[in-house]
Amino acid sequence: MAEHRTMQRRALLDAARVLLTEGGTEALTFPALAERTGLARSSVYEYFRSRAAVVEELCAVDFPVWAAEVEAAMEIADTPEAKIEAYVRAQLTLVGDRRHRAVVAISAGELDAGAREKIRAAHGGLIIMVVAALSALGHTEPRLTAMMLQGVVDAAVRRVELGAAEHPERIVDAAVVMVLHGVTPAGRAGHNGPPIADRG
């Protein structure tokens, strides 16, 4: 019986990933989960109390794997700048990955406060990865800078997901230039250190 419930729970999570990938958070409904898995709608409630609970568990299961891929990309980079670039590119490359959809769902207004807080905590662990690289560049407040850097990444993610006019690769390149050089174009940065605002 326990094994059956575990399999059903996995099936529901798999169905949730598909729904999030195909239609975003709005597509993730209990009737849709029931239809995808062949369960009665009432049976879905036996596994998850709400849509927020589904997203919360997806993050708990998928986020560590997703974050590990970002970390692995950073580990093979040999300079702080390269590590930061890898951090940005790896996340944006994973935009189309079904596991990423649960992380993006944090912005959905219907998630309860508990679910949002747990997802933010997981996201915070991702941000920590880039703090050391920012410190190595001489940033005086590397954690604050890391949070702002992640804001650029999140904005680029939304741009890609909206199907913006720009090709996804252009969005990725623009995000990399923004986090490494601010509003100064890459070819005109004029220095190899941290952004001017962070140099004392």
Image (tube, grey):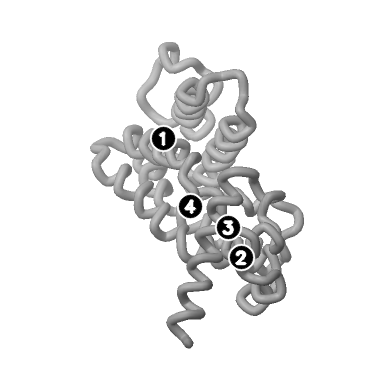
Q: Position of residue 52 (x, y in %)?
A: 67, 64
Examine the image and state in which quarter residue 38 appears: bottom right
Residue at mark 4 to residue at mark 2: CA–CA distance: 13 Å
Mark 2 → mark 1, Cα distance in angstroms: 28 Å
* Residue located beneath label 4 in the image: 99
SS assignment at label 4: helix
Residue occupying image coordinates x 64% and y 68% = 53
Q: Amino acid at mark 4?
A: Arg
Instruction: Give neighbour class at mark 4: few <14, some 14-19, many 20+ (Cα, 10 Å).
Output: many
Rendering quarter of residue 114: bottom right
For this orientation, the residue located farthest to the right is: 110
Three-letter code for the amino acid on which mark 3 is drawn: Ala
Q: Secondary structure at mark 2?
A: helix
Give neighbour class at mark 3: few <14, some 14-19, many 20+ (Cα, 10 Å).
Answer: many
The alpha-carbon separation of the residues under discs 2 and 3 comes to 8 Å
- Comes first in the chain, label 4 or label 3: 3
Q: What residue is shown at x 52% (from left), y 20% (from top)?
A: 167
